[in-house]
């Protein structure tokens, strides 16, 4: 009798493991289908010839967490493994002269940050996370001026603050998406898409043709269907004119989590990109080199969502009214 029970348990375990492996292989295969051509870098920069783009760029950081670089960069390829690293969870605030605000990502709520950070503390050797407050909380009265949002991808640490931001609105909050982000989530982003679909006052808007998708009603902002990290990962390009000078800014999302991923063409840790968030290694390398080319040859500024020290050194100011 005991032998039969053990054989049954072993068979069940094999079925579970086999199902998980099939699901993982399917997820990896699906993301490799998202390799649409990237727009030429000179076209990306040239798209900024508009006098009515955003005139302010600032950021809100919803949480900070000190952790080792080995949690975000392949330790076998990192030339500076002992350098400090702080994972940030920002929302980037683009503002037009008429006061309208468009957000790139919205970060997390305080409770969401606590839960998210606890996982990294247990699994990634991170210190306790420090929540700073949701984007809605930090924007204060200015949150009523938020007209739209774009998400670099739909993981919870980028989308979680949307419920507070969308609450008690008198008009819809527009969210712009490529086809891939709107229609082809995987198990890591399905919850984020569902949150957007079920949040009152959110109006999902499909972007027009690419590869450089103009954002309607928000001149000077474009979206590039990236893939690589998730099927619906998006690069957001903004041509920001401040003090008479226009610069091209690219919001990288999680294509890398540390700027040295771009500087030295370093992927994320192997088990992370294989199991935790299945990535397309070929596309990710293409994107890292593409972004480095945009910066080094075409003078674009790159903002990596989860690299707090790089954001602080970027010259972009923290939000203040």
Image: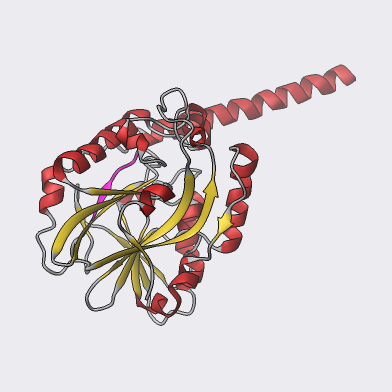
Identify which residue is drawn at 46% across, 66% down.
Answer: 135
| Image location of residue 256, percent across then percent down | 38, 40
Q: Quadrant of residue 35?
A: top left
Q: Is residue 181 left or right of residue 140?
A: left
Q: Is residue 38 above or below residue 13?
A: below
Dominant secondary structure of the residues highlighted in magenta in the image? strand
User: Does the segment drawn in magenta span residue 235?
Assistant: no
Way the structure is coloured: secondary structure
| Residue ranking furthest to the bottom | 170
Report whether 151 appears left or right of 108: left
Residue that appears at 40% across and 58% down: 105
Q: Is residue 318 above or below residue 229?
A: below
For the C terminus, the quadrant is bottom left
Give me the residue at 56% from left, 59% from top. 131
Q: Work out whether residue 53 or residue 244 is closer to the camera in this orientation and state it.
A: 244
Q: Is residue 224 magenta?
A: yes
Q: Is residue 200 visible?
A: no
- Number of dots carrying numbers: 0
Give the x, y percent position of residue 248.
19, 54
Q: Picture coordinates of residue 108 (x, y %)?
A: 51, 59
Q: Which residues are magenta?
A: 222-227
Q: Between residues 204 and 65, which one lies in front from this camera angle?
A: 65
Residue 107 visible within the image: yes
Q: Eyeballing the image, is 282 above or below 183?
A: above
Q: Residue 22 placed where, x, y %?
A: 53, 28
**Quadrant of image for the N terminus:** top right
Tell me which corner region of the image, top left, top right, bottom left or bottom right, holds residue 34.
Answer: top left
Most foreground residue, 44 or 278: 44
Residue farthest toward the top in the current orientation of the protein: 3
In this image, 192 relative to 36: left or right?
right
């Amino acid at each position: 009798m005991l032998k039969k029970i053990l054989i049954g348990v072993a068979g069940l375990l094999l079925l579970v493991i086999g199902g998980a492996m099939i699901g993982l292989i399917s997820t990896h295969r699906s993301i490799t289908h998202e390799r649409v051509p990237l727009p030429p870098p000179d076209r990306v920069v040239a798209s900024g010839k508009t006098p009515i783009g955003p005139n302010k760029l600032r950021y809100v950081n919803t949480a900070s967490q000190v952790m080792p670089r080995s949690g975000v960069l392949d330790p076998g390829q990192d030339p500076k493994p002992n350098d400090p690293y702080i994972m940030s969870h920002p929302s980037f605030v683009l503002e037009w002269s008429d006061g309208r605000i468009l957000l790139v990502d919205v970060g997390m709520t305080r409770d969401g940050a606590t839960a998210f950070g606890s996982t990294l503390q247990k699994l990634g050797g991170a210190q306790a996370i420090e929540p700073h407050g949701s984007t809605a909380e930090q924007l204060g009265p200015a949150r009523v001026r938020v007209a739209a949002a774009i998400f670099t991808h739909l993981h919870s640490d980028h989308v979680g603050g949307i419920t507070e931001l969308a609450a008690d609105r008198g008009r819809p909050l527009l969210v712009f998406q490529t086809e891939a982000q709107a229609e082809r989530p995987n198990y890591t982003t399905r919850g984020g898409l569902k949150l957007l679909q079920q949040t009152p006052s959110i109006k999902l808007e499909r972007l027009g043709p690419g590869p450089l998708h103009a954002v309607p009603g928000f001149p000077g902002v474009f979206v590039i269907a990236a893939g690589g990290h998730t099927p619906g990962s998006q690069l957001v390009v903004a041509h920001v004119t401040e003090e008479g000078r226009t610069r091209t800014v690219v919001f990288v999302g999680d294509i890398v989590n540390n700027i040295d991923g771009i500087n030295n063409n370093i992927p994320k840790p192997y088990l992370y990109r294989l199991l935790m968030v299945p990535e397309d290694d070929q596309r990710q390398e293409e994107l890292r080199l593409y972004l480095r080319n945009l910066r080094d040859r075409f003078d674009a500024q790159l903002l990596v969502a989860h690299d707090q020290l790089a954001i602080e050194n970027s010259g972009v100011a923290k939000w203040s009214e």
